[in-house]
Image (cartoon, grey):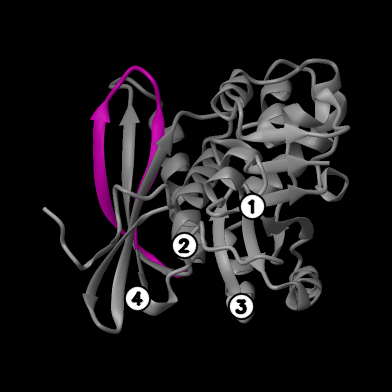
Amino acid sequence: MHNPDLLVGFDSADDGAVFRLRPDLAIIQTLDFFPPMLDDPYIFGQIAACNALSDIAAMGGNAILALNILAFPEDGDKAYLEALLAGGAAKVAEAGAVLAGGHSIVDATVKYGLSVTGIVAPNSVILNNKCKIGDRIILTKPLGVGIVAAAHAAGEAGKVAFDEAVRHMTALNCHAMNIAKKYSVSAATDVTGFGFLGHLNEMVANYSIIVDSGEIPLISEAYALAREFLVTAGGQKNRNSLSGEVEFHGVSAALQEILFDPQTSGGLLLSVGEAEAANLVAELAENGVNAAVVAHVAERQGKNIYVY
């Protein structure tokens, strides 16, 4: 049954559900959880929380309330559990939200994340597919964390690259969005499991997006690892799912793999007017966010995305 107050729901591939409570107030609801991708439980808790909180930021909202989602072995290490939950709680607090409990189940493998509620004015919701012709698309974190994390687990990636990946995965996207909201952001999303190209594809409506691959920031070693075929199965799934939607021109196989690589707690993709893009990138840089203009929105062509 259709409810007119459900502003964003099943029929959208957006980052969260949006429900209007009154003319001037709506809530954004999201949840996300997954198994650890590294050994340190505190850092894993931080990353999982950042990943879940990011959906609220991507839609222009402010997180206010979070609940833990946890699967943990019955005989699991309680010190590990305490560190994991402490990491998540730290990022919820940094985002300005309240952690108010949660739910756990017994499972053979650890899984952790959050259900998050945010608030936003209904007329201030930022959707993911409302780009305007001529907009520049800004990426706020470098790509390659999936490849680097997987390679590090296999002993193939160095500590510098891994530490860089962790630093970006534990950075909250709400800080970048708080700056971006001072500009005319027409559309936004975050880069997570579908990779850069998968989430960029979700931004496409009745236009095409042209990517300048030479401007895309990368995690250290990511390109070298991809060139040595140290790639992820998730990246191959993303490539297959986008068959027919993306066309490459002079882009190396290694860089293609990075563009398909699933990201955990990746950056934001912000679609802003051409006149404002450079100023937004500069202000983000002043606040420690090394963002870059990586694409522009053009009149509709044959494909959704062209990568040069």
Among numbered discs 3 and 2, the one appearing first in the sequence: 2
- Residue 6 or residue 89, whichever sits in front: 6
Any part of residue 107 in sight: yes
State how far apart marks 1 and 2 are (Cα): 19 Å
Residue 21, x across and y down, in percent:
21, 74
Q: Which residues are magenta?
A: 96-117
The residue where tag 1 is placed is: 300
The answer to whether residue 158 is seen in the rendering is no
Judging from the image, what secondary structure is the residue with disc 2 in?
A: loop
Q: Earlier in the sequence, mark 2 or mark 4?
A: 4
Q: Quadrant of residue 238?
A: top right
**Upstream in sequence: badge 1 or badge 4:** 4
Instruction: Give the label on residue 208, or none.
Output: none
Left or right of 65 on screen, residue 168: right
Residue 242 lies in quadrant: top right
Amino acid at dot 1 = Arg
